[in-house]
Amino acid sequence: MPSTPNLSEVTSQLHEAILIAAPKIVETNIDQAKKGSYLHAKFLFEFAGLQAIPPEAADAEEESLAQMLLRELENGEPDQAPS
């Protein structure tokens, strides 16, 4: 019966293997991203800390449609359009 591997040794070997392969892995991901692979590009941007930053909210003072509808419901009757 084979002995149970030491978790610390296995982890150390995995880290070493990954570190050795990392440059080739990144290079391959870049090549795939350049060919148009969205997932490879997304991974690379996130890995490099270049995630898309959500745009600032439009004007904070601008009333949203939901806020306008809620205001109209609370006031009772909606404003009447001129005839």
Image (cartoon, rainbow, N blue to C red):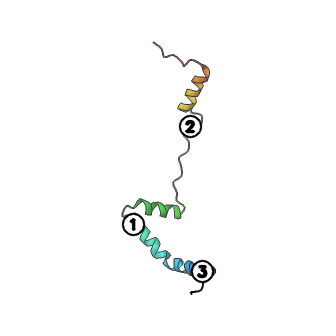
Q: Residue furthest top?
A: 83
Quick one: label 2 or label 1, which is nearer the N terminus? 1
Is 24 located above or below residue 47 in the figure?
below
Residue bearing the label numbered 3? 12
Question: Which residue occupies the foreground of this view, 48 or 12?
Answer: 12
Residue wearing tag 2? 59
The Cα–Cα distance between marks 3 and 2, rounded to whole angstroms, is: 52 Å
Q: Secondary structure at mark 3?
A: helix
Quadrant of residue 35 within the rendered picture? bottom left
In the image, taking residue 8 as reference, residue 32 lies left or right, namely left
Q: Position of residue 13 (x, y in %)?
A: 56, 81
Label of residue 32 in the image: 1
Amino acid type for the residue under numbered disc 1: Gln
**Residue type at mark 3?**
Ser
- Compared across the picture, whether 41 is left or right of 57 comes to left
Residue 34, quarter of the rendered image? bottom left
